Amino acid sequence: MSANKSSVSTKRILSFIGENYKSYPIRGIFAIIFRTLTIALTTLPALYYKDIINILSKTQVATSEIAQHGLSILFIILWIKLVQFIFYRIYDYIIITFEMNIQEKLYNQIFSYLHQHSFQFFANNFSGSLISKVRKCVSGLERFTDMLSWNVLPFILNLILVVGIIAVQNIRIAISIFIGVTVFSIIQYQLHNWIHPYQEKANQLDSELGGLLSDTITNNLTIKLFASLPREQKAFSSLNHDTVQAGNYNIISQCESGDSQHFSD
């Protein structure tokens, strides 16, 4: 947040996120462990459902024996679901407290960093825009953590489990699935790189719009004294139009990317 523009690369952002994660390593490790367990338990019932189908397909087995085996398998699935529910609740508590602690630390860190700047820095930047950037920084870290927890990690673990289970039965089908998912993942990554400039521009204009609105409200008395409301209205309308246009391009690009993502799912 310096006065001069500094290059913000993906490597710097990931390094910044990693440093905040390292502040609470134990919670992070337990969050990964319990998330992995819940995902693994999600796959187990499918294996028992297969056993039920195999039992029902046997014509030489007595009905009482089928019912006995079927009920025992259903009870096993019930216990798996119960354990999974408990693990989910533990994981929810860990990840929520993990994110809240990081947010608290990050807010304090940003507050200290901002007030180390000179008077010229605050004179050259909208106060409302700075507040918007601070909130987006904190909420962005939360969204990134949720994305890792609810999208990336389940995708990787489910892929490993599904490919591993299928490989036991047919290695060729497993390899085909792995190659297909890999290809669609690469396509999705390339589409994300294409979308990124639109998202960055839309976020930047949104911060500027919020900053301009905040400062006009704060300096309302000055605007009225110098009769500068028409000029401020014109500036706000122009910036608002640019923000809406950038948001439209962002939505269109996200829809095109989403079509590919749903197809890959």
Image: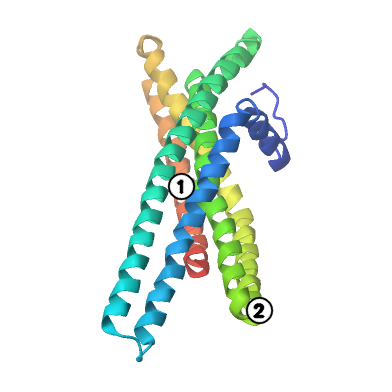
Label ID, residue 247: 1
Colour scheme in the image?
A: rainbow
Using the rendered image of the protein, determine whether residue 39 is visible from the camera's viewpoint.
Answer: yes
Q: On the image, numbered disc 2 is attached to which residue?
A: 171
Quadrant (top left/top right/bottom left/bottom right) for the N terminus: top right
With 77 as the anchor, is 257 left or right in this view?
right
Residue 231 position by quadrant: top left
- Please determine whether, in this image, residue 34 is positioned above or below residue 186: above
Q: Nearer the viewer, residue 240 or 87?
A: 87
Q: Quadrant of residue 158?
A: bottom right
Q: Does residue 43 appear to the left or right of 16 in the view shown?
A: left
Q: Nearer the viewer, residue 15 or 125?
A: 15
Front tag of 2 and 1: 2
Q: Is residue 132 left or right of residue 24?
A: left
* SS class, disc 2: helix
Q: Mark 2 packing: few (<14 Cα in 10 Å), some, or many (20+)?
A: some
Three-letter residue code for mark 2: Ile
Tag 1 secondary structure:
helix
First-in-chain label (2 vs 1): 2
In the displayed image of the protein, which residue is found farthest to the bottom?
59
What residue is shown at x 34% (from left), y 57% (from top)? 78
Residue type pointed to by label 1 = Gly
- In the rendered view, tell whether residue 31 sits above or below residue 102: below
Q: Position of residue 105 (x, y in %)?
A: 56, 20
Can residue 201 be seen in the rendering of this structure?
A: no
Residue at left offset 45%, top offset 25%:
212
Where residue 29 appears, x then y in whole percent?
A: 60, 37
